[in-house]
Amino acid sequence: MKILSKLGNEALMQREKTAFVCSRKTPDGLEYLVGKWLLGLSPEHDCVMCGNQSPMERAVFTTLLQRRIPSVLMLAEAMPAVFGDDVNEALREGRLLIATHCDAGVHGVTVRSAFDRNVLMMSLAQKIVVGYCTKGGKLERALAGFDNVEHLENGQPWLKMPGEVKSEPAREEPKRSRLSQWSRRLRLGDGTIYLDFNDSGAETYFKITHGTAADGGGCVRQKLFFDRKELAAFRDAAVFVDGKLAKGEDVPAELSVASLSGDVTFGLVARGDGRVLNITQTKNLRGGGQRINTVTLAAGGLPALIKGVDEALLEWKE
C-alpha cells in the first residue's frame, strides 16, 4: 500500500508529522480537548496529517487551513478534479499536500479504502493523536500495533494548566452487550490465548489475543482481528490445517485468509519434542513495511482453538 497520487507541496512529507484520527461518534466535551490540542500547534513547528471522513476530522482540517498550519490531507478515494477556495489558497502558498492511495477507479469512499487510508497515514506519521476511538470500531482495529499514540479523550498533562480547573464531561456508563460479555480463556502451552468480542453496537469484531511472559517481566500480547465473515473463513482454514496435522502432512504455504486487519497465514515449526503452529496476521504498509502479529500455540492445541471459534460463531448471529 502506497501513495499513488499527490498534489501540492511534497516537501511536507519530509517534515516530522502528526496524524490526527477520530471516530465518527464522539462524546460530549471532546471539542474542548481537540481545541486545546489545536491551540498548541504552530505553523513554524508542526505538520499535521488527517483525513476528512468523520465530522471531527473535517473540523480539524478546516481549522488547520484557517490557522495556516502545514497539513497533509489523506484521501480515501481518487483525487478530485475541483477543490474549495480555502484548499486552493493553501496549495498555492505551499502549506498543503493532498495525497491518496486510491486509483482513478475509486470514485467514493469505501470501508476498505478508509481503513487502508488510516493505516497508511499512521505509518507515515511520527506521532498519532486520537481525538476519540469508538470501542469495537474500525479505527480501533487500524490502531492495533502502533505504539506512538496519544489519546486526547483520556486527558493529557498539558491540559492541566496552572490556575485552570478542568471539568470532565459527564459520561453515561455504556451498557454491556451480549457479545461483549462472551469470552474464553485457553491455556495452550506457550502462555494463554483469550477469545473475546469488541462490540460497541457500532462495529463488532472478534479478537484472538495471545499473552506470553516478556523478558524482564511483564506480558507481551499479540492480537488477531476478524469480522464475522473473516472469522468463518479463518475457522474453515484452521479445520483444514488440523486435518493436515492429524495426517502428519505439511501446511500448504499458500494457505491464506483475507482480513481487513491483514491476511492470515499458518506456519508449522519444530520445537523440542513437538511442533508449534504460528498463526500470523500481516498488514502491508507503505514502502514495503509490515505490521505483523503472531499467535503461537502447540499444534495439539488447535482443536481447542477451533472449538472456541465455533462457540463464538454460534453466539455471533447475522
Image: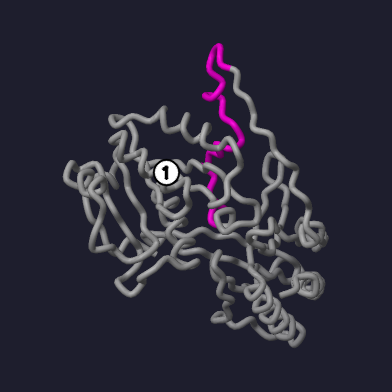
Residue at 52% over, 24% down? 158
Q: Is residue 177 left or right of residue 25?
A: right
* Residue 166 on the magenta segment: no
> From what the image shows, is residue 165 above or below residue 94?
above
Return the residue nearer the eye: 293 or 7. Answer: 7
Residue at 35% over, 67% down? 102
Question: What residue did someone put label 1 on?
Answer: 59
Could you tell me if residue 192 is visible in this image? no
The kind of secondary structure element at disc 1 is helix
Residue 22 percent across, percent down from the top left:
51, 48
Return the residue nearer the eye: 17 or 53. Answer: 53
Residue at 75% over, 73% down? 317
Q: Is residue 282 left or right of residue 203?
A: left
The stretch of residues the image draws in magenta is 142-164
Q: Is residue 191 left or right of residue 43?
A: right
Could you tell me if residue 318 is visible in this image? yes
Q: Residue furthest top?
A: 163
* Residue 152 on the magenta segment: yes
Residue type indicated by callout 1? Ala
Q: Quadrant of the N terminus?
A: bottom left
Q: For mark 1, does the 10 Å Cα neighbourhood hold few (<14), some (14 to 19), or many (20 or more) residues? A: few
Residue 246 percent across, percent down from the top left:
77, 84
Q: Quadrant of residue 41?
A: top left
- What colour-coding does the image apply? one colour
> From what the image shows, is residue 249 above or below residue 84?
below
Q: Quadrant of the C terminus?
A: bottom right
Residue 203 percent across, percent down from the top left:
63, 61
